[in-house]
Amino acid sequence: MPRPQRAFAFPRGLKPAIPTSTASGLKPVANFGTNPGNLTMQLYVPKDLPAGAPLVVVLHGCTQTAADYAEGAGWVTLARRFGFALLCPEQTRTNNPNLCFNWFQPGDTARGAGEAASIAAMVEHALSRHGLDPSRYSSPACPPAGR
């Protein structure tokens, strides 16, 4: 079977750009608080976001990064358009080689422990640091395994 030809070939020595958190507008936040789940905090706060704005927390699926999901699913555009801060916790390969959140591990889902505690610390940090309204915090449902 003949090998399909590529529609575009990069000139020798050049490689395609790989999307990063800064390309999506997400910014990594270090030292957000306790992090027993060993997660990374990625946050997008639209320019001129007023005090008391809502916070939306979204979790990427397996094999995705926070930036991939936030940009690809349109969350960054929605945050900009409708005026909310966007928190995107990010899994690490150290925790799960497929970048899945460990929702199936009791130690990561128990209140005050593991990944759940890390995400709670991220939420508290974002709410207090950016003057967001804690009564307007939301985490839309997202199916496991990134489906």
Image (spheres, grey):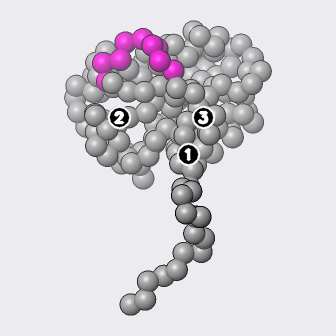
Amino acid tagged 2: Thr
- In the rendered image of this protein, does residue 70 appear above or below residue 111? below
- Please give the residue where the numbered disc 2 appears in the rendered image: 92
User: Secondary structure beneath disc 2?
Assistant: loop
Residue beneath the point at 51% across and 31% down: 88
Instruction: Inspect the magenta stretch and tell me whether residue 33 lies in it.
Output: yes
Q: Is residue 87 visible?
A: yes
Residue 135 lies left or right of residue 107; in this view the side is right
Residue 102 lies left or right of residue 69; in this view the side is left
Badge 1 crowding class, 10 Å Cα cut-off, few under 14, some 14 to 19, many 20 or more, is few
Amino acid tagged 1: Pro
Discs 1/2, front? 1
User: Which residue extends farthest left?
Assistant: 106
Magenta residues (range): 29-37
CA gap, disc 3 to disc 2?
18 Å
Badge 3 crowding class, 10 Å Cα cut-off, few under 14, some 14 to 19, many 20 or more, is few
Q: Earlier in the sequence, mark 3 or mark 2?
A: 3
| Contact (Cβ within 8 Å) of mark 3 with mark 1 | no
User: Secondary structure beneath disc 3?
Assistant: helix
Amino acid tagged 3: Thr
- In the rendered image of this protein, does residue 35 appear above or below residue 39? above
Front position in the image: 113 or 46 = 46
- Please give the residue where the numbered disc 3 appears in the rendered image: 22
Q: Earlier in the sequence, mark 1 or mark 2?
A: 1
